Image (cartoon, rainbow, N blue to C red):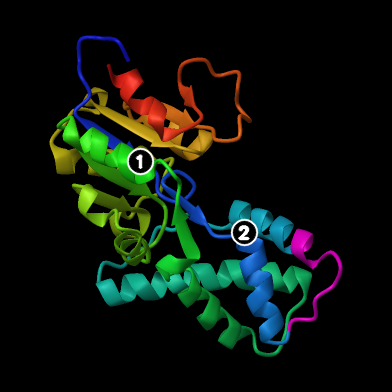
Amino acid sequence: MHDDLSIRVVFFDAAGTLFRVRGSVAEIYLKYAVQFGFQQKADSLVAIKEAFGRAFREAPPPVFAVTEPAHIKQSERLWWFDIVHNVFYRVGMFERFDDFFDRVFAVFEDPASWELFPETASILKRLKGQGLELGIISNFDSRLFSVMRGLGIADLFDTVTISSLAQAAKPASKIFHLALNKHAVDPEEALHVGDSVRDDLEGAQRAGLRAILLDREGKHSGWEGRCIRTLNEIPDLLD
């Protein structure tokens, strides 16, 4: 980061970077599925987790041709319905699936289902205090707004750019360029921080931004310099 052009904006991915699900996604789906009549087996948790991985890999990006807020929400919901249906089609379908989906979709909109990483609030305030603009670039859907408000971080961000409203999803350069335009900065004046090699690191770099991979568990230790274990390391990289 030590070059003449200084960073003016720091963008963050949302889920997995600033906050995480309480418990695990698969545990939450299993818990509610059982309430609605799913027959749990010994390997159900592992099976659900694997089926989700596969369903996400096979799903189209969450990019929709509609622009009306009500239609966007409907499209987001249908996108998720297809993924969750795909999962339970593999691990065991049950009669009250539609009611289950309604319930679980609402659960993930509830801020109580999420928790900030310990350093998130303090590091965002510190960066803001240094005069940096802050933004979010996320493939999360519009439920993100209520989650951010509930977690108390919504007011710390100048912009939020999400795939369903941007009509582009990471790693596509378009979503990064739309976010940059909101701040009126050039790509090299922006830093993007996220936990996905493909969506965050490679996507941002291809769009011309500086990028740092957040690797909380040390899975990518080979990447010297562009890899951090906690958000607390960001200010040192900016100095």
Please name the residue shown 25% across and 41% down the image: 125
Residue 200 can be seen, yes or no? yes
Secondary structure of the residue carrying tag 2 is: loop
Q: Is residue 199 above or below residue 57?
A: above
Residue 40 falls left or right of residue 15: right
Foreground of the two, 13 or 20:
20
Range shown magenta: 38-47
Secondary structure of the residue carrying tag 1 is: strand
Quick one: label 2, few (<14), some, or many (20+) residues within 10 Å?
A: few
Q: Are marks 2 and 1 in contact (CB under 8 Å)?
A: no
The quarter of the image holding the C terminus is: top left
Q: Is residue 140 above or below residue 209?
A: below
Residue 43 location (% of width, % of height): 84, 64
Residue 224 location (% of width, % of height): 52, 15
Q: How many marks?
A: 2
Please name the residue shown 44% across and 51% down the image: 19
Foreground of the two, 239 or 74:
239
Name the residue that disc number 1 marks: 12
Foreground of the two, 108 or 179:
108
Which tag, 2 or 1, sits closer to the chain's start?
1
Name the residue that disc number 2 marks: 24
Considering the whole magenta stretch, tell me its main secondary structure: loop
Amino acid beneath label 1: Phe
Q: Which mark is residue 153?
A: none
